[in-house]
Image: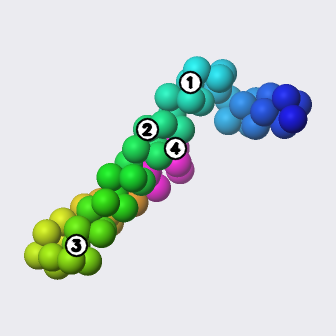
Amino acid sequence: MLKNISSHLDDAQMNYPEHFIFAIGISSTLIYAGIACACHAILPNLFTTTASLAVNRLQDILNH
């Protein structure tokens, strides 16, 4: 298992703390977008672009 972790970190060109901070940032954005979507489902006039903007931002981050 440690070999798999090391391999992934090497592939990502990050050390463990860098990867941890990056992954927490991605997951926080996804959680925020998910909550916004749930609120939007109940009140469609709220958070009309929040999730799509978050997805676009994440796509930019992950593609660079």
- Of mark 1 and mark 4, the one earlier in the sequence is 1
In this view, the residue in front, 59 or 48, is 48
In three-dimensional space, the C-alpha distance between marks 2 and 3, rounded to whole angstroms, equals: 22 Å
* Secondary structure of the residue carrying numbered label 2: helix
Which image quarter is the N terminus in? top right
| Distance CA(mark 1)–CA(mark 4) | 16 Å
- Residue type beneath disc 3: His
Secondary structure, magenta segment, majority class = helix
Q: Which mark is nearer the camera, 3 or 4?
A: 3
Residue 18 tag number:
1
Question: Which residue bears the numbered disc 3?
Answer: 40
Q: Which residue is drawn at 85% across and 29% down?
A: 2
The three-letter code of the residue at mark 2 reads Gly
Q: Is residue 19 above or below residue 54?
A: above
Distance of label 3 from label 4 (alpha carbons): 30 Å
Identify which residue is drawn at 30% across, 68% down: 37
Q: What percent of the width, then of the height, locates residue 15?
A: 66, 21
Could you say which disc has been placed on residue 25 in the image?
2
Q: Residues within 10 Å of mark 3 (few under 14, many from 20)?
A: some
Q: Residue furthest left?
A: 45
The count of marks equals 4
Q: Which of marks 2 and 3 is nearer the N terminus?
A: 2
Residue matched to label 4:
64
Label 1 to label 2, Cα distance in Å? 11 Å
Residue type at mark 1 is Glu
Quadrant assignment, res 42: bottom left
- The region drawn magenta spans 58-64
